[in-house]
Amino acid sequence: MTNTQVIIKELPQGELTQDHFEVRTGEMPTCADDGLVVKTLLMSIDAANRAWMQGATYREAILAGDVMHTYSLCEVVESKSDRFAPGDIVATEARWAEYCAVPAKAAQKMPTDVPLQNLLSVYGIAGKTAYHGLMGIGRPEAGETVLVSAAAGSVGAYVGQIAKAWGCRAVGVAGGAEKCQWVVDELGFDACVDYRDPGFFKLLKEACPQGIDIYFDNVGGKVLETTLFQMNDKGRVVCCGAVSQYDGSAPSGPRNLPGMIVVKRLRMEGFIVMDFHREDAEAMRNLTRWVEEGRVKVIEDVVEGIENAPAALIGLLHGENRGKRMVRVAPDPA
Amino acid sequence: MTNTQVIIKELPQGELTQDHFEVRTGEMPTCADDGLVVKTLLMSIDAANRAWMQGATYREAILAGDVMHTYSLCEVVESKSDRFAPGDIVATEARWAEYCAVPAKAAQKMPTDVPLQNLLSVYGIAGKTAYHGLMGIGRPEAGETVLVSAAAGSVGAYVGQIAKAWGCRAVGVAGGAEKCQWVVDELGFDACVDYRDPGFFKLLKEACPQGIDIYFDNVGGKVLETTLFQMNDKGRVVCCGAVSQYDGSAPSGPRNLPGMIVVKRLRMEGFIVMDFHREDAEAMRNLTRWVEEGRVKVIEDVVEGIENAPAALIGLLHGENRGKRMVRVAPDPA
């Protein structure tokens, strides 16, 4: 048996490219006490993967020579833990590898009554990040205007749909006219504005005639700066990501910070999904209902084959995905 | 009778100077229906005065040719309102002028059982801004580290003293070694760091060995940027002012925003004192008790004479004041 892996050959200083990765054949892992050997089925591809290469975040940094880290859905193939048996489906911090050894305490048993892909998209981190960020940090009221950047992305696509289901005006920001059209036509946003358009400020104003009450920010940078000028007093900025800042070596800050926070009494706040684990059951109840009612569409972007993981991540950083991107390493168990 | 006034001759594009002001003799105001004519006693001098010259904030902008706006304590000399009589002491939005006409609804009757100066300092906007910002936005717990910039200033001096009274470690940031020493010796902060020192980052780290839980930000800019790197997870930034940004024409934003908010799950939030009017009684009770117990010292910086108001404001923007700065236009009524 072989174990195909993808390693980080060199940490990127600027833009991430194929040259930073190397596909190789590794050893088969062995099972430690209180550990599992798992077979990777689906790997979540996230902008956060790139952030991990920037040094310390809320988790340990990735180093050159490491097999790339990932959040994955896996099948247990060997268990030295009472809590898991071969054949169990688990979610765990794993690696870009066909097989991994993981501590049992880092694995979470997953339900098998929904398609596995959904556990990475609407019922997974993407859907929960959208739900908890919007509801727990943004705290929308019906009738308010919710703006979200990376609107065609894994989280953004749900933020706008949840905002609509909650009775808000949902406006997206995305790159390119074609993608913006897709956000309106396919996801049902009220409007979507192309940040690459030289008239972005004015177009945003037209799309948000009552101003912006909540901005769900996935990108930081210039889009954040422009948005802050159009926030209403007491507006909230849900700080979910800063993808515009991850893939370059010289980030610059919005020039109107902290001025706009002071003047407009804004709240800007960051979070991780785990901060809201007490509200997970409520989130799942609402998301399931909205999916069943057709108010939230499940959009998934599946790339086949572990060897394509570097291209999948690089493409995501360039905004080529539509909805939640993942890499299928092996087919779902029958 | 004459009415000395100070007008804004020209709005500043960069640094504010004496040339932007002109002292002149104006007409005596006449009393409108439901209005008052008031005699100015004490004018509050605030960094916000400078921000008002930058265009729209939470209040109307000041225009070239206007008599400079101010928050003042005044004595009513003529009243066409049932609610006020000559001799009453009121707080009101007024002008840099010996006499003003103001609408009665914009005036608030003030108590006369404490020195008038205290109504602009510890029991006025300075003390209330410090109290509500720290307690209502920062929400400190005993043992946490509270950092405050402009620590020798009107608000900062109270923030640190209130933090100490609440059981926190209080660390200041100020400009110059002498001022920092004063903050420690006179105000009782645990430490105070000179932001002009080339080793600021390292000195701040030494002064906050447990990291920073709350940063009460009066300045924005580089001090904010440096502080964000040293905030603890789930830290709070009370966005009270951005004085480093007011008096220049090319503000630049902290390069680690919104990145640090995302990674450390920070909350940055702005406010005005009026947001917390329901907590005003509690604030007054606690401040009065702490003053009586000697735990909060009342620090006032009184400049004599309306003609010195421009210099008082310019000096404040350069950080020359110690505690709450105000201009005395006329002596307290006997």
Image: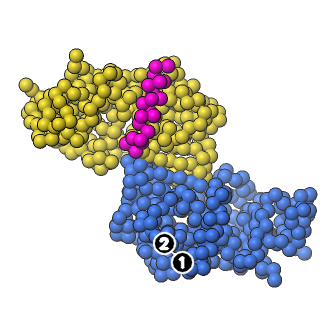
Chain colours: A blue, B yellow
Chain letter of disc 1? A
* Residue A217 x, y percent position in the rendering: 51, 61
Which residue is label 1 attached to? Answer: A295
Q: Is residue A22 above or below residue B199?
A: below
Please check whether the numbered discs 2 and 1 fall on a single chain: yes
B321 to the left or right of A329:
left
Name the foreground residue: B18 vs B334.
Answer: B334
| Corner quadrant of residue A38 | bottom right
Q: Chain of mark 2?
A: A
Q: Position of residue B184 (x, y in %)?
A: 52, 22
Q: Nearer the viewer, residue B64 or B171?
A: B171
Residue at 53% in and 34% down: B147
Q: Residue at x 12, y 29 (%)?
A: B3
Q: Main secondary structure of the magenta part?
A: helix
Q: Where are the magenta residues, as a range?
A: B274-293
Is B289 magenta? The answer is yes
**Which residue position is annotated with label 2?**
A164
Q: Please say if the residues under marks 2 and 1 sit with CB atoms less than 8 Å apart.
A: yes
Amino acid type at circle 1 is Arg
The amino acid type found where label 2 is placed reads Lys
Percent of width and height locating residue A207: 38, 70
Q: Residue furthest bottom?
A: A334
